[in-house]
Image (cartoon, helix red, strand yellow):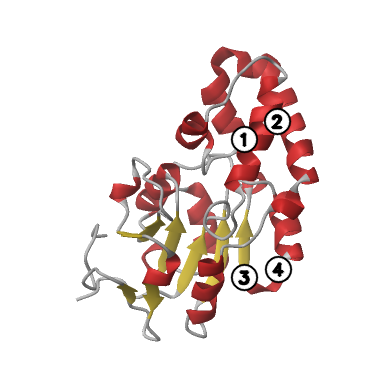
Amino acid sequence: MNPFLIRAVIFDFDGVLFDSEPVRFRAGAEALAQIGVTLAWEDFVRCWLGRTDEAGLTEILGNRFASEGPQVIERRNAIYEQRLDEVQPYPDAGRFLRRIPQGTRLAIATGSRRAEVEGILWRAVMTQSFQAIVTAEDYTRPKPAPEPFQIAARLLQLSPASCLVVEDSPAGVAASEAAGMPVVAVERGREVLGLERATWKVATLDDLTLTPRGEVVVRGNPIGSGRQP
């Protein structure tokens, strides 16, 4: 028996709805290179993926963050904003959105800034698809803390257990667990440590379906398998 009856889906943004992470990585690497710091993809995934710029760069720069971090963030933001046209939606995310039963509420909870998120959504003509958008400006404790997801649930006026999170980062999976929300981790051909804590893992969002009743159906897994609430 499926222990979850879902009334809303809360999406992470980068790497879940949009293929923005390579663009964000290149912008961050370029900004860090200006202070002599080399950013490897593996370090980006471990420290920065799914988190705010402040949280990620604090881990990358350590005690250098106080003096150099704000300038790196400013440069990273400027570079990324110049490249928003390179960010494209994932086709499987679009197909999943179209399969979600009518009446299911939709939200975004992300570590990205609102200007970035709204700019990308506007270009993709998706701004009106979401009833709540929670960005880095809206909370003080970023993922892996549960606050971004808790705020999204409050805006949707729903209990945490009725909100399904879709994530691609260990920080996001940990945040959903702390919020008491079931979470699907989408891998898309990547192996990322920490995703095994998710309620379910899928290769793509084509493997994920919600029934009109709100049950989670994952291709290749029996209904109700995975981490329990």
* First-in-chain label (4 vs 1): 1
* First-in-chain label (2 vs 3): 2
Can you identify the residue that label 3 sits on?
A: 131
* Marks 2 & 1, CB-CB < 8 Å contact: yes
Based on the displayed image, in which of its 4 quarters is residue 224 positioned?
bottom left
Residue located at (64% from left, 41% from top):
24
Can you identify the residue that label 4 sits on?
A: 127
41 up-or-down from 60: above or below: below
Measure the C-alpha gap from mark 2 to mark 4: 25 Å
Measure the C-alpha gap from mark 3 to mark 1: 25 Å
Measure the C-alpha gap from mark 2 to mark 3: 29 Å
40 up-or-down from 68: above or below: below
Can you identify the residue that label 2 sits on?
A: 73
Helix or strand or loop: what does disc 2 sit on? helix
Where in the figure is residue 40, as x and y percent of width and height?
53, 28
Question: Which quadrant is home to the C terminus?
Answer: bottom left
Measure the C-alpha gap from mark 2 to mark 1: 7 Å
Can you identify the residue that label 1 sits on?
A: 53
Where in the figure is residue 76, as x and y percent of width and height?
72, 33
Helix or strand or loop: what does disc 1 sit on? helix
Measure the C-alpha gap from mark 4 to mark 3: 9 Å
Q: What's the residue type where badge 3 is placed? A: Gln
111 up-or-down from 36: above or below: below
Between label 4 and label 3, give the one nearer the viewer: 4
